[in-house]
Image (cartoon, grey):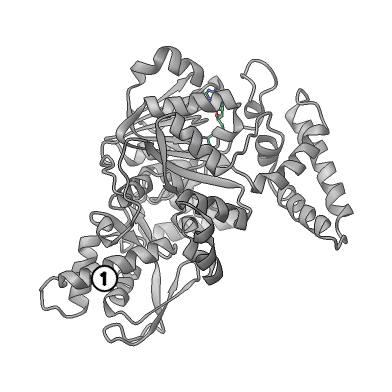
Amino acid sequence: MPPPSESVNPYDENPFPRQSLAASDPSRLAATGALFGMRPAPLDNCRVLELGCATGGNLTPLAARHPRGTFVGIDYLQGQIALARQDAASLGLTNVEFQAVDFRDVSRDGGDDLGTFDYIICHGVFSWVSPPLQETVLQLCHAHLNPQGLVFLSYNIYPGWHLRNLVRELVCECTPATDPPAHRVAEARKLLDFFCWAFHDDPTPYGQLLKGELEVVQAQPDGYLLHEQLEHDNNPLYLHELIARLERHGLQYVADSDLATMFVENMGQTVTAELPRLADDDIAVEQHLDVLRNRAFRQSILCRADVPLSRALDGGTLAGLYLVGNMRPDPPSANITSSELVKFVTLRGSEMWSPSAPLKAAFEELGRQFPRGVLLEALFAAVANRLGQGGRPLPADVQATLGRDLVQCLKQGVLDIRGGPDSFVGRVSDRPVTMPMARWQARHGWQVTSGRHESLTFDEPARDILQHLDGLHDRAALLKVFVDSVGEA
Ligand SMILES: C[S@@+](CC[C@H](N)C(=O)[O-])C[C@H]1O[C@@H](n2cnc3c(N)ncnc32)[C@H](O)[C@@H]1O
């Protein structure tokens, strides 16, 4: 991207939407780091830096959730930083600071003052700046990361972007980069519409492939077209190229933020049997998996190169972590305590079958507690209780087997992990209270950040109700808010 003063900056006219990104939540980063043998900083008073924070859509909700933490956001666009500061002030947050500074100047002058951080987030930035600036980003990550710190880095990748680049080049060529953003988007849409129509009945593999890609881009909002397809810089790379560059900067790859994508076992029996024979190491396996999936985007978790990692995940690595799983036995009356094979259905609709009484009891407990995460040690105690251990803990060998089974579920994407406890309640009270940040977002038209840092979209009546979840309104009052809101709509 060119410096802001040099041309029409697409972010001024079409700012990046204010959204929180669940994958960048330090609680997730901490859990992943711990799983791979690290000792990430406690979340309560963590220090978090966001590079390219834009209007603070991701950082501000984190600062609100961790009032004892320290949060610093950096972006060179004065207008976006001014909005971020205004929002933080309106929320009364004193633990977040937004700095209008270019990454290149942080390393030049401000480097030492900035200090070091437990978590560094750099989302939607790396591929969208020039290669020299990418080097600056990696330098900053290394210079400002604590010894056990974790980085969240998102970027576009090959092979998925080979095909996408074809569409990008097509639309980029149709207008000069200096034209007003709205005009560029309109012209790009005309071309997309034409080619989608032209390929409509084309039965050839080429036509089908391109039509699929064109339709993906066509369905995106204007902001996506502007910031992805028409962006001045969009530099995807292969995973192995990123790994080599990380090494040069004293950093290393820990894991993908979507753990299940890392494991070949999730790709079916034939691939599981054949692929490891063709790949020398875990990175080569992941690289080949990217090809199999035609993957176009990655969200990676990184740490310093000198941190010893343990890649052989076993049950013990879950100690001290919180497990999250929304699974229900099907049928609900299924026998949990026997060795009968029982089906569980997860939130995402996938099915799990298990004959193991401890695993079935763990699933049942996780489903009962959902959306709250359950500390592994508390889960063991609950399983012992359900299996009628008469107050005694689960025997060590049962704990070890259950731990391994749970790690297996994690690798398959059936379970999720967190580094700290949630603030969810299990029962809705008579006068429900939600997070002040969520009420504020509902009032100001933002997407609403959940207790798990997800970005949620609500309609007007839901926004109205959310604003009234302040502990002062009982169910009758909330019903009236709803009826009035629907009446007005
Ligand atoms: C695509 S936006 C992503 C914003 C935000 N991280 C998000 O995901 O919502 C990229 C951001 O990086 C910022 N940026 C790009 N180059 C920069 C530089 N050299 N110094 C500081 N910020 C920069 C832009 O101003 C922009 O706000």
Res 451 seen here: yes
Q: Would residue 123 appear left or right of 310 to someone viewing this image? A: right
Cβ of mark 1 under 8 Å from ligand 1: the answer is no
Hey, which residue is sitting farthest top in the picture? 109
Q: Residue at x 35, y 58 (%)?
A: 474
- In the rendered image, the quadrant that contains the N terminus is top right
Question: Which residue is nearer to you in this view: 236 or 232?
Answer: 236
Question: Which residue is nearer to you in this view: 444 or 418?
Answer: 418
Q: Secondary structure at mark 1?
A: helix
The crowd level at tag 1 (other Cα within 10 Å; few <14, some 14-19, many 20+) is: some
- In the rendered image, the quadrant that contains the C terminus is bottom right
User: Picture quarter containing residue 234?
Assistant: top right
* Figure check: 120 above or below 453: above
Which residue is identified by label 1?
A: 401
* Figure check: 162 above or below 345: above
Give the image location of residue 459, x and y in percent. 56, 53
Report the image quarter containing ligand 1: top right
Give the image location of residue 239, x and y in percent. 54, 43
Dot 1 amino acid type? Thr
Give the image location of residue 310, x and y in percent. 31, 50
Q: Would residue 24 appear left or right of 217 to someone viewing this image? A: left
* Figure check: 317 above or below 272: above
Q: Residue at x 40, y 15 (%)?
A: 110
Give the image location of residue 171, x and y in percent. 79, 38
* Figure check: 387 above or below 92: below
Q: Would residue 61 appear left or right of 161 to someone viewing this image? A: left
Res 73 seen here: no
User: Picture quarter containing residue 319?
Assistant: bottom left
Q: Residue at x 55, y 37 (%)?
A: 124
